[in-house]
Image (cartoon, rainbow, N blue to C red):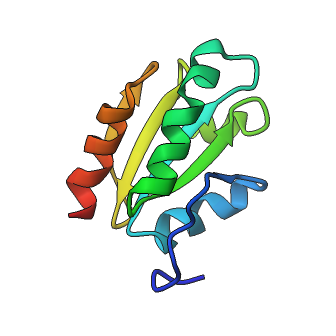
Amino acid sequence: MSSTDAVPTEPIHLDSAADFDDYVADHDVLLVDFYADWCGPCQMMEPAIESVANDTDAAVLKVDVDQHQALAGEYGVQGIPTLLVFADGELANRMVGAQMEDALTSAVEAHTA
């Protein structure tokens, strides 16, 4: 996969923590959603997360903190949802707690323009 590939229009679910850095490297802008299935605010945000994947030039990667505890720890995730925006491979923004769709779109579009 290279950055010339079309940006996925649906959130990608991280299967292997070993792939995380590849996703960061392969996409110019990547929104990472650290979530858990049992997290109410995470579930409420799902439509907004899907909209960002569908309506912006950012890729969206969903990381289940129960499956990927070490990765969550590496990025200092203490509360969920935690959303990270990576731009050109660098961490550019961090949001903790449920966000409105507008806030997510703005955070992503600040780096896709």
Residue at the top extreme, as displayed? 40
Q: Residue at x 53, y 18 (%)?
A: 79
Residue 52 in sight: yes
Residue 67 drawn at (x, y percent): 79, 37
Residue 44 drawn at (x, y percent): 58, 21
- Whether residue 5 sits left or right of residue 57 in the image: it is right
Q: Quadrant of residue 57?
A: bottom left
Residue 34 drawn at (x, y percent): 58, 35
Residue 43 drawn at (x, y percent): 64, 23
Q: Residue at x 52, y 40 (%)?
A: 49
Question: Between residues 88 and 57, which one lies in front from this camera angle?
Answer: 57
Question: Between residues 19 and 10, which one lies in front from this camera angle?
Answer: 10
The quarter of the picture where the N terminus appears is bottom right
Residue 75 in sight: no
Tell me: residue 56, above or below residue 6. above
The quarter of the picture where the C terminus appears is bottom left
Tell me: residue 9, above or below residue 44. below
